[in-house]
Image (spheres, rainbow, N blue to C red):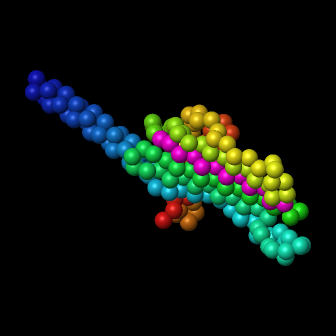
Amino acid sequence: MKHSGEFLMSKNIALVIFAIAIVTIISNAQNTNIVGTWQTGGLSTTDDVNTVTGFRTASNGNTLKYEFRPDGRFAFVGYMQSTMYGCTTALFNDKQGKYSIDGSQLTFTPAKNFWRNTYSCSPSSNKERNYVLDTEVYDVRNKTDEYGKLYICLANAKGETCYRREN
């Protein structure tokens, strides 16, 4: 009987070690799943025509792109453009720094946060600035769309945005 009790205890210890190993593997797999380039965006299907030059441009469009590197660094580029009545407003953001993942929480620690705002009809109102370097925290999750494409979704109090992995 004494030997079967020791065997049972050894079996339980082995089971606990196995469970810890599985959780560690899954956690590490989730961390490495984010490495790569992820993008979202869209472009209007209608054009805006400049009546003086005849030049056509998409009336609205945006692209948001993250690159997560294996060394814990990230780069983000965001661009939004809207043309109305021949005037184009554009916003550009270049953000870089470090990221870390703890469970389902993604933390960005930016070292650069550059913004540019341009308005074609009033160039004197154009602005460039290095914005605040506040830490940002998001809940992160993976999802797959109906075509089998992998996405990561970043959510905080402001909402959720999902990004598709680039090939």
Of residues 79 and 115, the one nearer the viewer is 115
Q: Position of residue 156 (x, y in %)?
A: 62, 38
Residue 80 appears in the figure: yes
First to last magenta residue range: 87-98
Residue at image point 60% right, 43% down:
113
Residue at image point 75% right, 53% down:
118
Is 6 left, or right, of 53 in this rendering?
A: left
Specify the quadrant that holds the N terminus.
top left
Q: Position of residue 55 (x, y in %)?
A: 81, 74
Residue 39 vertical position relative to residue 6 in the rendered view, above or below:
below
Is residue 93 magenta-colored?
yes
Dividing the picture into quarters, in which one does residue 137 lie?
Answer: top right
The majority secondary structure of the magenta stretch comes to strand
Q: What number of labels is visible? A: 0
Of residues 12 and 78, the one nearer the viewer is 78
Dividing the picture into quarters, in which one does residue 60 lie?
Answer: bottom right
Residue at image point 60% right, 49% down:
94
Residue at image point 50% right, 57% down:
37
Residue that extends furthest to the top in the rendered view of this protein: 2
Residue 139 appears in the figure: no
Residue that extends furthest to the front in the rendered view of this protein: 124
Is 153 left, or right, of 43 in this rendering?
A: left
Of residues 25 and 100, the one nearer the viewer is 100
Of residues 59 and 146, the one nearer the viewer is 59
Is residue 57 magenta-colored?
no
Q: Position of residue 14 (x, y in %)?
A: 22, 35
Is 98 left, or right, of 81 in this rendering?
A: left
Residue 149 vertical position relative to residue 99 in the rendered view, above or below:
below
Q: Position of residue 64 (x, y in %)?
A: 62, 54
